[in-house]
Structures are given as structure tokens and as C-alpha cells.
Amino acid sequence: MENGKCIRHFLKKFVNNTTIDEDGYPVYRRRDDGKTISKCGVELDNRYVVPHNRKLLLRYEWCNQSRSIKYLFKYVNKRNDRITASFYSSGTVDAENDECDEVSMYYDCRYISPCEAAWRIFGYRIHFRDPSVVRLGFHLPGEQPVVFQDHENLKDVVKKASVKESMFLGWFEANKKYGEAQSLTYSEFPSKFVWKPLPRKWFPRKSHSVIGRIFFVPPGSGKIYYLRLLLNFVRGPTSYKDIRTIDGILYPTFRYACYAQGILDDDKEYIDAIEEASI
């Protein structure tokens, strides 16, 4: 009760039939049957009753609107609740001279509701993504990334066969092996082929719908930016020379090949790149 009124708007009105109001809330039927009960000296009738179904409440929790779901699952449609917490000691003898390391005292904590915790414990899927997206890496000649452990000798690492293999170089080899690959650009390639990390090779795809996305490169990156532009047009190359070959002519650089392809005749590619980066 606030200022003599119930904040839940009781007592309600007598209603013959259950309806839904304009805000999506149910207006339950309340019979005017003349029955009352005395509580603390106050006569109460059906206008004071909170509608409920005892059997359903014991077994189910039913929702008919998104706002109720958000409440039950701690706003699952929003981000997780977060809290900034710090720990410190006080009441020491020499408290004034204690140094405070703010970095070590700062913790970015995350709150998980009981519903979300149970969902994760049972290993249910948190979200779905369809179709799957494959990120396609690429590199200039001799600049493929090499992954190694801290304790490994660099001379031994360089001698590994995997150093000369990458997803991008595997694309060249697949174009030599499969005739269907000759008609696909690099971004279209995952729709028909799948990359196997262990053998480090591309194989024909047997199932699933997949799309490819080439890594973004800013215009100021130089050679690799022009290489990325050409990858959107060149189909079935088997080497870097094939990428730089336009209409049977081998150009000395990727930039000249872009001009020959007509990609850099105007500022459209630069404008598109700036807009993509801004988004």
C-alpha cells in the first residue's frame, strides 16, 4: 500500500469473461457470486483474489509475452549483468602507507542467472548461426603465418612441411586437382569445398550450406590490399602469377593487375572500403 492505495491496482473490477488488454496483459474473469472472506477484520471478495492455478504453478511456468520471458531469464535478450568489484584491506596498523594496486584490485565480474547456469551445465546450445561462415585467410608470397611453441627451435620449425602450407596455398592446389574449382572465386570456394585442418587440404563438400568471407584489409596496406581486390574476381588460379594475369597478360604487380581489371578506374573501391570499415 502506498498513500492508501494498492500498487498492484487491487481491488479489481468484476468481469464476466477473461480478455487481453491493449498492453497484452490478461484481464481475468471475476465472478460476482456474493462470496466473501474476512481477513484482519476486512471483508474480501473475488475482486481481491490473485488469479492462479495451483497445479500449473507446481508443474509449469507459462509465459504469454516476451517481457515475462525477459524477467524469468534475467533479460536473456540483452547482455549479461556485470559488476565492477574491488577488494581492499582496512584497519591495519600502517593503513596510511599501504600502496593500492588498482589493476590487481579490479575485477570484471559476470552474473549468470540460475536459468542460464542450468542451460550451460546441460550443454544446450546458446545460439544458432545459419548458414555457417568460414573466414578465409590469404597472404603475399612467402608471408604465410607460422604457428609454433615457445620451446621449439626456429630452425626445426622452418623445416616442417606445414610451413609451406596454408588455406590460401591449398586453394591453389585444389584448383589444379578439381575441375569444379576453376569456376569459383576464393570467397565462393567454401560453398563447394571444405578445409580440413589436419591434412591441410581442401576436399569437396558433401553437406551443409556454408559461405566464405575474406579477411578485411584497409586500403593503406599496400600490396595485400590489391591482392584482396583481385580475389573477388579471379577464378581458379593455381599460382600468384595467375592472379596477376588479366586477359592473358601477366602484370608485374597486383596493383597494375587491378587497373587492368578495371577495379581502380574510379574511387568506388576506396569508398566501399571506408564505408565497410566505418560499419
Image: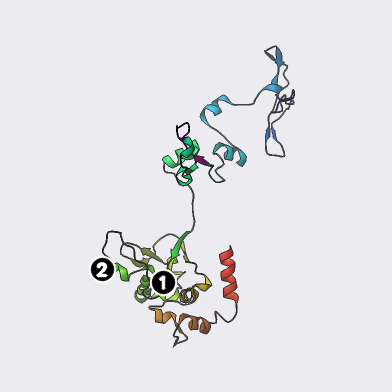
Provide the residue designation for mark 1: 139
* Image quarter hosting the C terminus: bottom right
Coordinates of residue 111 in the picture (x, y in percent) = 50, 40
Q: Residue furthest top?
A: 41
> Amino acid type of disc 2?
Lys
Looking at the image, is mark 2 or mark 1 nearer the viewer?
Answer: 2
| Distance from Cα at disc 2 to Cα at disc 1 | 22 Å
Count numbered badges in the picture.
2
Residue drawn where x is 36% and y is 74% of the image: 142
Residue 202 x %, y %: 36, 67
As drawn, which residue projects farthest toward the bottom? Answer: 249
Name the spot of residue 95 as percent of width and height, x first: 47, 35
With 251 as the anchor, is 266 left or right in this view? right
Q: What span is in magenta?
A: 84-94
The mark nearer the N terminus, 2 or 1, is 1
**In this rendering, is residue 40 above or below 20?**
above
The residue nearer to you, when weighing 99 against 228, is 99
Amino acid at dot 1 = His
Q: Secondary structure at mark 2?
A: helix
Q: Depth check: give the residue in front, 249 or 227.
A: 227
Q: Quadrant of residue 150?
A: bottom left
Residue 224 vs residue 15, the one in the foreground:
224
Q: Is residue 26 magenta?
A: no
Tell me the crowding category of disc 2: few under 14, some 14 to 19, or many 20 or more residues within 10 angstroms, Cα based: few
Residue 163 in picture, x, y percent from top left: 31, 69
